[in-house]
Image (cartoon, rainbow, N blue to C red):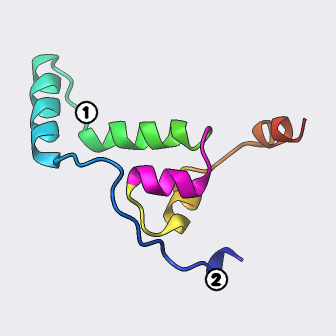
Amino acid sequence: MLQKLQPLNLTPAFDLQPEPLSTVFRRTTRALEIDDLHFHDSRREALTRMAKKVNVMDLAKISGHRDIKILLNTYYTPDAASLADLLD
């Protein structure tokens, strides 16, 4: 079923420019002397947490992903206990 889905044609939910955010993030991590933390790490963390609370279509709108397969394979990785909780 998932293979038959077409990639989504979505627009970003927020009009944020990456350059200013990246600059602030880089300056902050440098000031805090954090060497191994990158801006994309925060995006992945946020999407992983949101994947536990919102459905894949909404997450695609939030993240700007056009192909939900990436979201399903990367961020939607529930363990058996989480799936069992959904059935209660």
As drawn, the residue found furthest toward the top would be: 32
Q: Is residue 51 left or right of residue 29?
A: right
Mark 2 highlights which residue? 4
As drawn, the residue found furthest toward the right would be: 88
Residue 31 location in percent, x, y? 10, 18
Q: Is residue 30 left or right of residue 63?
A: left
Q: Is residue 41 left or right of residue 85?
A: left
Q: CA distance from mark 1 to mark 2?
A: 39 Å
Mark 1 highlights which residue? 36
* Amino acid type shown at disc 1: Asp
Instruction: Specify whether residue 28 is painted magenta.
Output: no
Label 1 Cα crowd, 10 Å radius (few <14 / some 14-19 / many 20+): few
Residue 69 location in percent, x, y? 55, 67
| Main secondary-structure element of the magenta-colored stretch | helix
Residue 84 location in percent, x, y? 85, 40
In this rendered view, identify the residue nearer to me: 81 or 16: 16
Identity of the residue drawn at 41% across and 61% down: 65
* Amino acid type shown at disc 2: Lys
User: Which residues are drawn in magenta?
Assistant: 53-63
Identity of the residue drawn at 66% across and 74% down: 2
Name the secondary structure under disc 1: loop
Residue 47 location in percent, x, y? 46, 43
Q: Mark 1 or mark 2: which comes first in sequence?
A: 2
Q: Are marks 1 and 2 in contact (CB under 8 Å)?
A: no
Identity of the residue drawn at 17% across and 25% down: 29
Name the secondary structure under disc 2: helix
